[in-house]
Amino acid sequence: MSSMDALEAIRKRRSVRSYTEQPVSDEDLDEILRLALLAPTGGMAQAWSLIVVRDEDKRRAFGDLIVKGGGEYFRTTRPAPKDATPEEHAEQAIGYAKKVLGSYDEVPVWIAALIVPRQAFPEDQASFERDADMVSIAFAMENLMVAARAKGLATVPTIFHYYVDKELRELLDVPNEVEIPLVSPLGYPTEWPEGLPPRLKEIRRPWRTLVHDDAWGNPRA
Ligand SMILES: Cc1cc2nc3c(=O)[nH]c(=O)nc-3n(C[C@H](O)[C@H](O)[C@H](O)COP(=O)(O)O)c2cc1C
């Protein structure tokens, strides 16, 4: 399959939350995974792994857990509607998660990004190491998302599993010392969002205000 160039793929990558059931070819998947793991990695530590879930039962269970976690995210981060009981609020939150993430049951591939500590730093610098590992796995996932986009495949960096961490670990047999900082579906989108939704577009800060010339406090307005 043809692919677009990197600049276009970066520009056109969007978080996609609605997927078709169309499978991803082994060839495309392998290439995307390989490109993900070509990302820079602090100290060449490669303190990372990716779990690729394609088994039908497992991917459905994965999708269900993400929806459940999404419900918890919406319940705890969005205000309760006026006069709603806690039960009604929880029900609304999970209902909303099911609505916006309704296709997660059918996503052909789930990717879990892992931090696998390599104990490369002295013990008293463990937090430096964890930060470097987190940055490195984020680079790998960005590579993965951009490579996927170039091939017409969609993703969305997701942390909803933080709310169901124990259950996801059990599903994937991930031991406690290995973190799961990020997961993503991988599949063909029902449609490509043209840009950000208006609500998000409105709050996108002009890039120049986020770039400072030579020192902090000197934005390139
Ligand atoms: C660290 C991180 C965590 C995110 N977690 C979630 C998530 O749990 N669920 C979700 O649907 N989107 C999640 N997103 C996607 C963001 O909402 C999205 O990137 C942002 O709205 C900008 O949209 P875009 O990716 O289409 O540019 C996450 C993004 C990042 C970088």
Image (cartoon, rainbow, N blue to C red):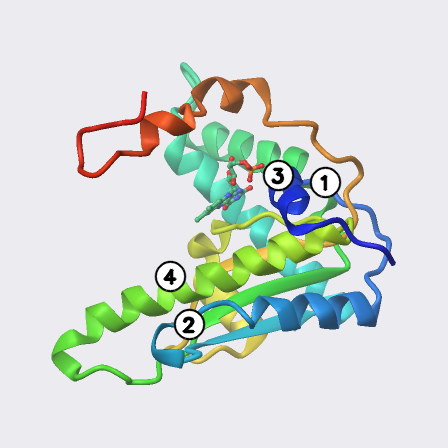
View extreme (left): residue: 124
Which residue is label 4 attached to?
135
Q: Residues under labels 4 and 1: Cα distance?
A: 27 Å
Q: Is mark 3 within 8 Å of ligand 1?
A: no
Which one is closest to the eye, mark 4 or mark 3?
Answer: 3
In the rendered image, residue 119, in percent from the top left (x then y), is placed at 28, 85
Mark before the other along the chain sequence, 4 or 1: 1
Q: Is mark 4 within 8 Å of ligand 1?
A: no
Secondary structure beneath dot 1 equals loop
Q: Is residue 80 left or right of residue 201?
A: left
Asked if labels 1 and 2 touch by Cβ distance under 8 angstroms, the answer is no
Residue at position x 41%, y 78% in the image: 47
Asked if labels 3 and 4 touch by Cβ distance under 8 angstroms, the answer is no
Which residue is label 2 attached to?
41
Asked if labels 1 and 4 touch by Cβ distance under 8 angstroms, the answer is no
Badge 1 amino acid: Ser
Residue at position x 51%, y 67% in the image: 39
Question: Considering depth in this image, is 124 or 175 the residue closer to the camera?
Answer: 124
Asked if labels 3 and 2 touch by Cβ distance under 8 angstroms, the answer is no
Which residue is label 1 attached to?
18
Which one is closest to the eye, mark 2 or mark 4?
Answer: 2
